[in-house]
Amino acid sequence: MPEVPAPADRAQRPTLSTRTGAQYSRIWGVGDHRPERIVTNDEICEYIDSTDEWIRERSGIATRRQAAPTESVADMAISAGRAAIEAAGVDPTRIGAVIVATLSHPLQTPAAATLVAHALGASNAAAFDLGAACSGYCYGIGVADDLIRGGSSEFVLVVGSEKMSDFRDWHDRGTAFIFGDGAGAALVGPSEFPGVGPTVWGADGSGYELIRQSTDWVQWRAAVESPDSTPEQRAWPFIDMVGPSVFRWAAFKMAAVAKEAVAAAGLTIDDIDVFVPHQANIRIIDTMVKQLKLPDRVVVAREDIADMANTSGASVPLATARLLREGRARSGDLCLQFGFGAGLTWAAQVVVLP
């Protein structure tokens, strides 16, 4: 073990300089991207033994968006990010970091965020992808808040972008109807008032198997190259889920996280104006609303689960942008936003809407 310098010796050494940033951060602007193609439940039911009525009853989903074959995770992120930057009225060169929350970018490297930063003119910004599945955007907002207050960045672009259709098993009755494509973004920057409350986040790896890719890339390649493998083993990897277990976990355990985020912000449920949970399942959303005892006046994001389906890391910013565009949520509203999903992961915070 190296010898630890005595306090007197250490005092003679140069002291490191550190950065300090803005006292507070807030969301300056939001944007979204919704692919043109609409896939109905009836189309999904051509591949599985189900009905439009059953899917609506069990999930609340009526349609979902599907990106074009040439439309990538990065393309959608660029579109949503550009809209957020324009809404904020900020020069892209002031962006110090670009974070793309995604589980569906098809390349191990480089990150989608590098393409996004370059396309949007965020020259020399740090750029990285964040892999926390459906919690990714809320994780990203927490990271952005810390980067800005710590002095590492003046502005941070956080994007949730997913092309879940690339990882949909059209023949899996339990998941074929669940997922959709899209992107949502927020530009976070310095503030004279607290605009992002403390992030309450975590993970429980004991639930790792409940939502996962059906096989890893190494196993899939080995199966494709093996003459002895079965068609099932050679099938393209897709997102698999143990639906009943995930439903029970999300519906009955995650409300406590949302309550903790409200308390961490120094608020009560009565102070909340808008609730934007991950758009996973309408029954999960309704159960959370009851457990949180939200006042009737609170605007609850429900529409995106109906016509966008589960867009994983993109769902919270997509729903937020929609509420603001339609005038159901207003600038200055206190919004409790909450993501939860594969990992198992979760993250929640209260933000002031831009």
Image: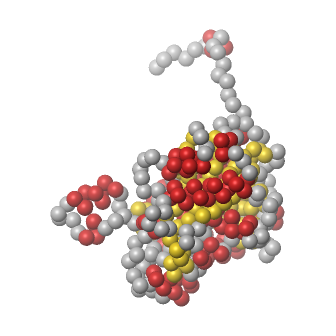
139 sits left or right of 226 in the view? right
Give residue 8's quadrant in the image: top right
Q: Position of residue 223 (x, y in %)?
A: 25, 61
Query: Is 103 drawn above or below residue 4 in the view shown?
Result: below
Q: Is residue 262 left or right of residue 305?
A: right
Q: Residue at x 48, y 85 (%)?
A: 42
Colour setup of the view: secondary structure
The vertical placement of 49 against 191, above or below, is below
Q: Position of residue 75 (x, y in %)?
A: 53, 58
Query: Which residue appears at 36% of the width and 64% of the height?
Result: 237
Relative depth, front residue between 84 and 250: 84
Looking at the image, residue 160 lies above or below residue 124: below
> In the figure, 341 relative to 173: above or below?
above
Seen as rendered, the residue at the extreme left is 227
Residue 345 seen in this snapshot = no
x, y percent for residue 48: 41, 82
Q: Quadrant of the C terminus?
A: bottom right
Residue 34, position as x, y percentages in the image: 59, 68
Please tell me how many numbered marks the rendered image carries: 0
Judged left or right of residue 109, residue 236 is left
Query: Which image quarter: residue 217?
Result: bottom left
Q: Is residue 297 visible?
A: yes
Residue at image coords 50%, 68% = 67
Quadrant assignment, res 84: bottom right
